[in-house]
Amino acid sequence: MTVVTLSHLTRHFDEVIAVDNLNLEVNTGELVAFLGPSGCGKTTTLRMVTGLLLPTRGDVLFDGQSMLTVPTERRGAVMVFQKHLLFPTMDVAQNVGFGLRMQGVTKKEINKRVSEMLELVHLPGFENRHPHELSGGQQQRIALARALIVRPKVLLLDEPLANLDANLRLEMRELIRNIQRELRITTIFVTHDQEEAVMLADRIALMFEGVLQQFDKPHAFYDQPSTAAVAHFFRNDNVLRGKRVGNQVETTFGTLSINANKVTQPDGDILITVRPEEIKLIPDGYDNIIRGEVLTTVYMGTYSQVQLQVDGNKWLAHGPADFGAKEGTMIPLQLPQERIWLLPAN
């Protein structure tokens, strides 16, 4: 069980700041997802944790001890890469047991632990197969078993599911989560897929351009994003300018009521946001009503996705599957008081 602390972690590549003053702590046995678009610094951070890169400034600590002078092979952190990197001339048993052979473990113990690992990743009896005889999902399971067999302190996963098809990704997500919960190993998982991060992680570290934007539980990124940019990354562009005065917000549509105990922004200029699925296209009263022009309606099976023009901005809302408002129609939208979240105006 290991606590991983990143303290003022910074990495420059010439004039480019890949990671900028990153501070966070991954608790023992926790699974944290580093999430963000390509080039945001998440893989660079992972490489600094494992020791493949040294930081320009800052520190990586395991249980309070700095790892900067500890070589990669002695840190107790192992990485599973996006590419499986299995040895093509070795069979599965040899691939999985490779780390133990490097440690001088006896053949009997290696065979025992290889069998245990193959059971863990649901591939018992695959010892004598070679990588070219395995599917992509099976190869990734073998790569995971090879990492886990050395009983690392920290497991690092660098977009390991990116090369798998949709069904295999779902299977591997469930497998990784189940194994992580069973072993209670401190795990950092890198991904650019919001759904993947939400499904797997205890907490998510969202990064843009090397800077940590929000470090929180998955539901907070939907219900309580820290900025409009964070809301946008989680597919919510529904923002409206206003001015908070106590438990109300003054807007171009009139005064809206908010739950003052839920929001954190002070009085003054703010943005309000409501997720598409929380907007009521069929109001059940006269409170918190704004108006929008229907631009498009797309049938999604169990609901209709409605794009609207609201105060010069494009909004999305979810309506009933048989929602029939025509394009160009002005319709009322009700913003439930409990679902309004305030963002900084800038």
Image (cartoon, helix red, strand yellow):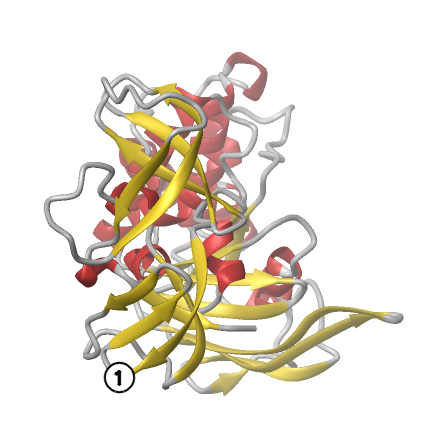
Quadrant housing residue 72: bottom right
Left or right: residue 47 versus residue 185 is: right
Residue at the (27%, 65%) spot, across then down: 256
Up-down relation of residue 215 to residue 273 (above or below): below
Up-down relation of residue 96 to residue 204 (above or below): above
Up-down relation of residue 96 to residue 267 (above or below): above
Q: Secondary structure at mark 1?
A: loop
Badge 1: few (under 14), some or many (20 or more) residues near its Cα, within 10 Å? few
**Image quarter in which the C terminus is found:** bottom right
Amino acid identity at mark 1: Gly
Q: Nearer the viewer, residue 236 or 61?
A: 236
x and y, in percent, of residue 249 in the image: 32, 72
Instruction: Name the residue that disc number 1 marks.
Output: 246
Q: Nearer the viewer, residue 29 or 173?
A: 173
Q: Nearer the viewer, residue 227 or 5?
A: 227
Residue at the (26%, 22%) spot, across then down: 323
Residue at the (35%, 72%) spot, across then down: 250
Query: Can I make out residue 189 in this image?
Result: no
